[in-house]
Image (cartoon, coloured by chain):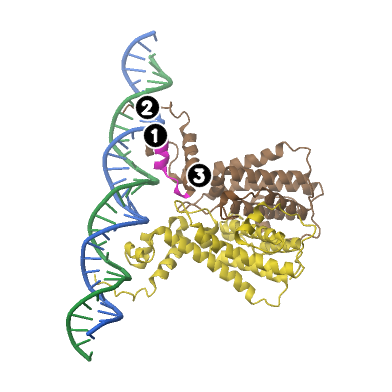
Chain colours: A yellow, B brown, C blue, D green
Amino acid sequence: MVRPKQKEQHPDLENAIKEVARSQMIENGSASLSLRAIARALKITAPAIYNYFPSRDDLVTALIVDAYNSLGDALRLSQASLQKASDGERVFASARAYRNWALAHPEEYNLIFGTPIPNYHAPMEITGPAAAGNMSVLIGVLHNAWQDGVLKTEGVLRSTPNMIQAWINKFGYEGDPVVVQFAMASWSQIHGMLSLEINGHFAAVPDDVDVDDFFEVEIRAMLTRMGLEGE
Amino acid sequence: MVRPKQKEQHPDLENAIKEVARSQMIENGSASLSLRAIARALKITAPAIYNYFPSRDDLVTALIVDAYNSLGDALRLSQASLQKASDGERVFASARAYRNWALAHPEEYNLIFGTPIPNYHAPMEITGPAAAGNMSVLIGVLHNAWQDGVLKTEGVLRSTPNMIQAWINKFGYEGDPVVVQFAMASWSQIHGMLSLEINGHFAAVPDDVDVDDFFEVEIRAMLTRMGLEGE
DNA sequence: TGTACATCAGTGAACGCGCGTTCACTGATGTAC
DNA sequence: TGTACATCAGTGAACGCGCGTTCACTGATGTAC
């Protein structure tokens, strides 16, 4: 067999590897990601991948970081076009962007937030900041609302500092801790709905169900709680 | 090597297999469950397992059903001792029971609600009813509150029927659909917090964080929304 | 009570498979002259 | 412009491993007489 010309079939093999890895995660789940299967799909041999990633785990880490950044981009993009919008609209937009990203990239969403991959341990010094970056977008939006004085901070049940303060100590935030609390709460709620939706727990037949409206209603209720009515 | 006396080392091998499977899931994650590893731990040979489970998938299915039932037992147990409690207290108790079960059985929780195991497809006719059974406990608690007339049903944002009605059509419920909506919403919120907590997303150092109070506050806010104040 | 026998849970070898990773290599490419 | 050469991306064989599953078997057990 004639050897194919180098760099012609795959002008950017590193990204091609990640692309194929992503599409194989969609088919078989992220836990069964295989270097040999990726190589087969790209019509190269498995050892060639080692020119780009030192090991399978490094490829997984790269995919995780990409996923965090991709989600972060989507969140930031949702805010970019809303300079004149109300704070409530901004929160709503970020929630929708979060969901739309997750629905468009379910396997990457599970890769980040789902059951950890067996025998893989994410290096916290790499994935930690990437994760916190996304959290910061949500906190930022709520922080704006707080600065605008529209966030409901009085008569609100507050967590004792445990978890909230731990986050602040680690990643830093100057402002009312209730902003972080609300961010965590909103995140939890959004994640809960998405996790159940993506993995088909809202109905016996996964494709049978339209969750859009349920999501909208729940986000609206969340906004009400935070004093950010309407849109 | 002398053959060990049958039925002496493992008087109930079927359950021993499931026990070992559960403990191996805790160590390595449910996705890497292996018949050979289970056999090794039990000091039997792998084919012996086939006397109890026709295939690996059937073992997984049995574990899933067990997990659903175990969770369901915990939920029902939380209600059994509360005959004279308020509706709010009952909802609170079920939420706490849900969380306590999940924290005590994180890998089983992920097995049920986390990323699906690669190359395994749950038979819906078996796992569907098991899942719905647990949902019914939560619906039942809220249904009681509704019958008592304390559930907030006026001025509440309601989902258009899509998803809620699909559930009702499938599993049946006679009463205000808002009860099912609230059940789904509460479930989502609880699941969101637990999924993030169990998989270590609330802090860079998983064991560093006490989520108890955060959980309590969020459940309280949820109760407020549903009109089920106090405890 | 003692003996012959059927049962069937568990064995051990084997099947075909896919995996991550290593290694010496090769040959297309781009560069230096 | 043409030629010699260094580079290094990708190859192909091999490593040791674990997996689910099948199969004919064996021998401890409990039962029937």
> Which label is found at residue B26?
3
Crowding at mark 3 (Cα within 10 Å: few <14, some 14-19, many 20+) = some
Which residue carries the number 2 mark?
B4
Residue C12 located left or right of residue B13: left
Q: Nearer the viewer, residue B135 or D30?
A: B135
The percent coordinates of residue A129 (x first, y second) are 55, 62
Q: Secondary structure at mark 3?
A: helix
User: What is the span of residues highlighted in magenta in the rendered image?
Assistant: B31-42
User: In the picture, residue A17 is in which quadrant?
Assistant: bottom left
Three-letter code, disc 2: Pro
Q: Spatial distance from mark 2 to mark 3, Cα to Cα?
A: 29 Å
Q: Secondary structure at mark 1?
A: loop
Q: Nearer the viewer, mark 2 or mark 3?
A: 3
Q: Nearer the viewer, residue A12 or C2?
A: A12
B101 inside magenta stretch: no
Asked if the residue at tag 3 contacts the one at tag 2, i.e. Cβ–Cβ closer than 8 Å, the answer is no
Crowding at mark 2 (Cα within 10 Å: few <14, some 14-19, many 20+) = few
Quadrant showing the N terminus of chain A: bottom left
> Which label is found at residue A28?
none
- Residue A115, compared with residue A148, is above or below; it is above
> Which label is found at residue B43?
1
Residue B225 located left or right of residue A49: right
Of label 3 and label 1, which has the lower sequence position?
Answer: 3
Three-letter code, disc 3: Ile
Crowding at mark 1 (Cα within 10 Å: few <14, some 14-19, many 20+) = few
The percent coordinates of residue D13 (x first, y second) are 22, 58
Asked if the residue at tag 2 contacts the one at tag 1, i.e. Cβ–Cβ closer than 8 Å, the answer is yes
- Chain bearing tag 2 is B
Q: Nearer the viewer, residue B195 or B118?
A: B195
- Residue A148, compared with residue B88, is above or below; it is below
